[in-house]
Amino acid sequence: MEKASPRDAVALAICDAGRTFFEDLRDQSRWLTGDVNSALFHIRERAVKYANLFRQDCVVLDSNFWKLVENAFEDSVKTGHNNSDEAFTKMLVHYVEVAAPNLEKPWKICRYLYLPYCVPNLHWFAVEIDLEER
C-alpha cells in the first residue's frame, strides 16, 4: 500500500476504493466515520425520493450529533457545572436549526431520531431515540 498513489483504486463488488479508504481502515481513530456519514446521507436522500418506503416520522442524523452531545457532557464534567442545561439546550437548538445534515426534516414533526454511535476503536451501533417516550 505504501507504493500506491492516491489515485490508485481497487475494484470492489459495488464501488472502487482508493488508497485513503484503506488508510482509514488501518487508522482506528478514523474508523469509517466518513463512510458511515455518507451512507446516512444516502439513506436520507432515498427517504425523500421514496417517501412511501421509509418512515416519515423520523430524522436520520450523522455522527456529528453524538459528538456534540459527548463534547457537551465532557465540558460539563470538566467545569463541574450541573446547571449547564441552558448551554446544552442552546447547542442542541443550534444543531437542529443550523448545523443539521442535509435533507433532514424538521424535528417537530418527528417521533424518532436515528443516529450512529461508535464505541471508539470497537464497533458502530445504531441508536433509536423515541422523543415521545423520554
Image (cartoon, helix red, strand yellow):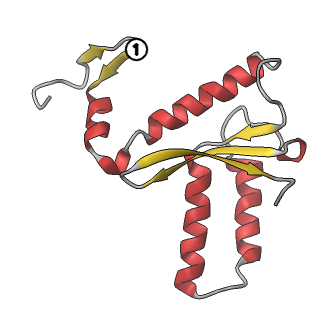
Total marks drawn?
1
| Percent of width and height locating residue 56 | 83, 31
The one of 109 and 13 positioned closer to us in this rendering: 13
Quadrant of the rendered image containing residue 48 = top right
Vertical order, 24 against 94 (above or below): above
Is residue 96 depicted above or below 71 in this figure? above
User: From the image, which quarter does the C terminus lie in?
Assistant: bottom right
> At which x and y percent is residue 14?
42, 12
Q: Residue furthest right?
A: 109
Disc 1 crowd rating (10 Å Cα; few below 14, some 14-19, many 20+) is few
Quarter residue 55 falls in: top right
Q: Is residue 132 left or right of residue 118?
A: right
Question: Where 23 sits versus 81, above or below?
Answer: above
Using the image as rendered, state which of residue 53 and residue 32 is in the foreground: 53
Q: Position of residue 120 (x, y in %)?
A: 41, 55
Q: Is 121 drawn above or below residue 43 in the view shown?
A: below
User: x, y percentage for residue 30?
Assistant: 36, 46
Furthest toward the left, the residue is 3
Residue position marked by numbered label 1 in the rendering:
15
Going 18% across and 24% down the picture, which residue do you hit? Answer: 5
Name the amino acid, label 1.
Cys
Residue that protrudes farthest toward the bottom in the picture: 80
Left or right? Give the position of 131 relative to 123. right
Q: Secondary structure at mark 1?
A: loop
Give the quarter of the figure containing the N terminus: top left
The residue under the point 87% across, 53% down is 132
Q: Residue at x 68, y 24 (%)?
A: 45
